[in-house]
Image (tube, rainbow, N blue to C red):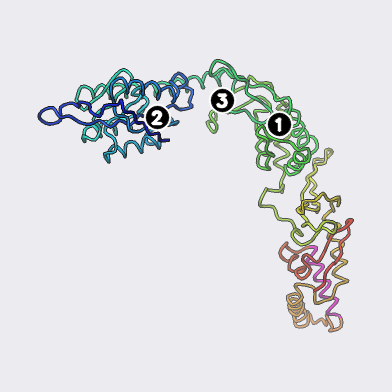
């Protein structure tokens, strides 16, 4: 952010240090640079407006020619990450300014890279002076050396602060408090003393999270079922967003909820949390066993047999599918059920009830008996397969089968065999000419359009 500063009371001359032989008078054109970041370690620094006000008063008192004011709200810990500072260095190198007015040396640099740029501009004769509230630095060995010492001191403070932060985090996790934002169902208690925040239960969301674990552990609900449930009850995150399916699985796999956490993540170092657990470890283990049930759907990869082929007869939306896994409590056997239901993509509420895949298949087999033979999508391939089998039976087995008048019956039987035992692609090929012509209404399949 730029701001022009002009005043008739400012003097246009200032004296520079010796350059070459003899003393040279240099017109100093100052850029007032004010910086304050939002990081905790800069809480004690003057605000940007306060820095500008103080330095403007100094400029008037000492007759400095301040031609522009620049503000910046970025940290100076890392080199090259401040847009305004980088632009200032470029403008000095190109002769727009030849002096800097700032509150303190650490406003300009707290890292070796930016400090080196300043000293380099002095060495090249582009930067003739840096003036702070209580010091000034010119292109003289002693003053450049002092500038480098103060800049290095600021860097040392940064480095030590980083070490202290790591040490503080280590002490915190050993006390049982996980650093960072807690998972959904918990909140951070803000403390006046930095590093002493505590984690407590979110009374609004915690009961729902606990119920989700119970639904999976005791009722064998799938991740998709939980996702649908949270959407139906309009459950929101702390930021007011819906929970995604991937987030559902992250919640269900997070041991923090029974009182354990890893820090840092991936380090293999586990700690017992001082926070109140939402669930028992026994329930958590039951959930992990349920999530490991074989053949459970993987989001974005699961393909069902008859999706993207039918329409809802009530609202016109596409028909989608979902899988439910149930474990027999008596013998431990796992049963898989697939249901087809309205995808509700039209934006309207739809009251159509889900339909089991077995019932869908039974009605498709009846449709094969009723439609015109030409509407069977794989008719030519089926005919070819039948001809091959007929030749094999006659030549090898010596049998006479598939008379012409029986060929249509054989094609229908073959098509029904594919719908029952074929692959997903083979099934779709059989129904190719009927895609989107079949609607489901009141759990009954109907052909609404015949080409």
Label 3's element? loop
Q: Which of marks 3 and 1 is nearer the N terminus?
A: 3
Which quadrant: the N terminus?
top left
Q: Earlier in the sequence, mark 2 or mark 3?
A: 2
Q: Which of 293 and 207 is in front in this view?
A: 207
Q: Mark 2 points at which residue?
A: 76
Splitting the image into 4 quarters, where does residue 328 fall? top right
Label 2's element? loop
Mark 3 or mark 1, which is nearer to you? 3
Q: Which of marks 1 and 2 is nearer the N terminus?
A: 2
Magenta-span inclusion, residue 411: yes
Q: Name the residue under label 1.
A: 284
Q: Look at the image and give the residue range highlighted in magenta.
A: 406-420
Splitting the image into 4 quarters, where does residue 394 fall? bottom right
| Left or right position of 6 against 350 | left
Farthest left residue in view: 21
Query: Which secondary structure dominates the residues rendered in magenta?
Result: helix
Label 3 neighbour load within 10 Å: few <14, some 14-19, many 20+? some
- Find residue 8 and report its horizontal and vertical position in percent: 31, 28
| Left or right position of 83 against 297 | left
Q: Mark 3 points at which residue?
A: 179
Q: In this view, does 215 lie above or below 427?
A: above
Q: In this view, does 198 lie above or below 262?
A: above
Farthest front residue in view: 8
Residue 148 appears in the rendering = no
Residue in view at x 84 percent, y 64 percent? 364
Q: Distance between the residues labelled 3 and 1?
A: 22 Å
- Find residue 392 and report its horizontal and vertical position in percent: 75, 79
Which quadrant: the C terminus?
bottom right
């Amino acid at each position: 952010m730029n701001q022009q500063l002009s005043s008739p009371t400012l003097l246009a001359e200032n004296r520079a240090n010796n350059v070459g032989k003899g003393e040279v008078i240099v017109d100093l054109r100052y850029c007032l640079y004010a910086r304050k970041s939002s990081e905790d370690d800069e809480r004690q620094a003057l605000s940007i407006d306060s820095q500008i006000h103080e330095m403007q008063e100094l400029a008037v008192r000492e007759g400095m020619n301040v031609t522009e004011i620049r503000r910046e709200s970025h940290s100076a810990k890392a080199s090259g990450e401040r847009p305004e500072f980088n632009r200032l260095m470029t403008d000095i190198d190109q002769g727009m300014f030849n002096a800097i007015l700032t509150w303190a040396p650490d406003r300009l640099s707290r890292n070796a890279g930016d400090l080196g740029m300043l000293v380099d501009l002095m060495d090249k004769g582009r930067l003739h002076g840096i003036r702070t509230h209580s010091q000034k630095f010119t292109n003289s060995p002693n003053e450049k050396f002092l500038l480098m010492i103060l800049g290095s001191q600021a860097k040392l403070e940064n480095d030590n602060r980083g070490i202290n932060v790591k040490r503080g985090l280590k002490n915190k996790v050993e006390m049982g408090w996980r650093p960072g934002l807690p998972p959904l169902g918990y909140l951070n208690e803000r403390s006046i003393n930095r590093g002493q925040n505590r984690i407590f239960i979110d009374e609004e969301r915690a009961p729902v999270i606990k119920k989700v674990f119970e639904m999976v552990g005791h009722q064998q609900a799938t991740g998709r079922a939980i996702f649908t449930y949270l959407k139906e009850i309009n459950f929101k995150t702390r930021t007011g967003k819906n929970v995604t399916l991937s987030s559902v699985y992250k919640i269900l796999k997070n041991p923090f909820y029974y009182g354990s956490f890893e820090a840092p993540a991936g380090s293999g170092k586990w700690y017992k949390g001082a926070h109140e657990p939402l669930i028992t470890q026994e329930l958590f283990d039951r959930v992990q066993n349920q999530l490991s049930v074989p053949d459970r759907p993987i989001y974005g990869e699961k393909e069902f047999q008859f999706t993207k082929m039918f329409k809802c007869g009530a609202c016109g939306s596409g028909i989608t599918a979902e899988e439910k896994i149930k474990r027999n409590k008596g013998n431990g056997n796992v049963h898989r059920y697939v249901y087809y239901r309205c995808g509700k993509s039209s934006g309207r509420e739809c009251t159509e009830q889900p339909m089991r895949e077995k019932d869908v298949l039974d009605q498709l087999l009846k449709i094969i008996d009723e439609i015109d033979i030409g509407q069977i999508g794989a008719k030519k391939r089926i005919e070819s397969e039948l001809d091959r089998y007929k030749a094999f039976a006659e030549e090898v087995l010596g049998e006479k089968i598939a008379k012409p008048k029986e060929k249509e019956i054989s094609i229908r039987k073959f098509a029904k065999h594919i719908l029952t035992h074929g692959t997903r692609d083979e099934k779709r090929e059989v129904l190719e000419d009927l895609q989107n012509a079949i609607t489901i209404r009141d759990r009954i399949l109907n052909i609404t359009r015949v080409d």
